[in-house]
Amino acid sequence: MQDTGASVALVYLLLPGERVLRLAVVSGAPVRLTAPWAQVPLDSPEAMAQAVRERRLVWLGSQEEVALRNPRTGLLLPYDFMVAAAPMAHGTMVWGALVLVWPTRDPPELGRPERDAMDAFCSRAGLFLQQAADRGLPLLPGAQPRALSRRSPRIPGRAEALAAVEFAEGLPMGCWALDPDGRITFVNAAAAKMVGAEAAALLGARPEKVLPWLSDSRFGDAYRAAVVTRRPISFTVLRPPDQWLSFRLYPHAYGISVQTSPATTGQAPTAAPWEQSAPPSESDRVIGAYPLTQLATTLTEAAGVHEVVAQVTGQLMPAIGAQALALMAVDEGRLRIIGHRGYTADVINRLDAIPLASRSPEAHVVAAGVPSFFATFADLKRAYPAAASHDGKAAWAFLPLIASGRTFGSLVLSYDQPHPFPPPQNAPS
């Protein structure tokens, strides 16, 4: 990362005889952000899989190119960044892949020094992995990827550190420091007062976990965008009942610095020329309806039912936050359950064999061919007065499964808690 200037690095391992790349090391981003890519099938269009299959460096120099060639990554991370992936090989064996991420720059090219640095690393890593395997001690990925944090080379003395704290405590705006995992490592008195919490309760926690009014998509998306793009991000959020606060996130190699100040309006503040604003409509799109409307299309590329369910549960459910799913296919005028996760057998029995002619959201999504979203049971009840909360969930997304222009089934995602979806798709057309 130091030799190439990359902001994020991922290392994947490929075990002999397997057809899945497993994420082993993450640096520059929280492990939870990488959950959708923890396991990548070798036949996937993702850059790391292509690099291993073709034993060559793969370069994606823009957001548009990422979205075109790696649709899942483009959907879940719709930000400006560049990606390079290279195989870690020795002799005839490929042992994994290195993935590096940079903020978009001009020109969007991978220079010779960066290529040379990647080649040198991959050669050394391939040799090391081969030697380990030859000794009967193959390097295996852990249950969770190992997170490597970059440390600032400058370590202040005690007097300097105390002076820095006194300086921050004397500022009228709120000051925060987040580590690479998004946890608070420092908060001044002004910030604690603005958010209405004790500093001791904030330290070591993620802001959205201890401040429920920050748990909407705006903070989460602003955080992800700052990590991936390494650009300042700003947004405004309401602290109940009536206090609007402006948050500005300044990412760097060792975490994120945050500035908080009162805002006089509920609208996003005007960003400085070097900043990128994250208004609610954009951030909601990222983890709300936008990726869900594309999810069914992605799933139709899967080879079979088990692969579809595995893709959703293993890669996408952690990212979209759903707790249960039911995969349904048209069969002789009814919708049959062909795969599910997170539902009890009793619920599945009630959902199975729904008539296509019925007035139900599951059947309607097949007839209409467009997704429907319901943030609460009240929303569902307004659209379908006869609906009953038979599955014990609080929010739903109903997505059509379409192949060759024909709707052959539906995917139902449900949430344990009310889950806001952006308009205009909160009800069927």
Image (cartoon, helix red, strand yellow):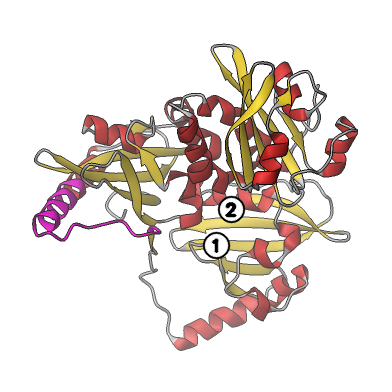
Residue at the location (34% across, 30% down)? Answer: 43
Q: Three-letter amino acid code at disc 2?
A: Tyr
Residue 229 % position (x, y) = 50, 45
Q: Taking 409 as reference, is 110 above or below it?
A: below
- 64 over 187 or under it: above or below: above
368 or 234: nearer the viewer: 368
Identified at 69% across, 45% down, the residue is: 346
**Are the residues tagged 2 and 1 within 8 Å (C-beta)?**
yes
Q: Is residue 143 magenta?
A: yes
Task: Name the amino acid, label 1.
Answer: Gly
- Magenta segment: does it hold 71? no
Q: Which residues are magenta?
A: 122-145
| Residue pictured at 70% horizontal, 71% vertical | 191
Residue 223 badge: 2
Residues 106 and 268: in front is 268
Question: In the rendered picture of this protein, how many numbered marks are placed on residues?
Answer: 2
Return the residue nearer the eye: 63 or 374. 374
Residue depicted at 80% across the width and 25% down the height: 428
Judged left or right of residue 388, residue 179 is: left
Is residue 348 shown to the viewer in this render?
Answer: yes
Q: Position of residue 12 (x, y in %)?
A: 31, 48
Q: Which residue is mark 1?
A: 182
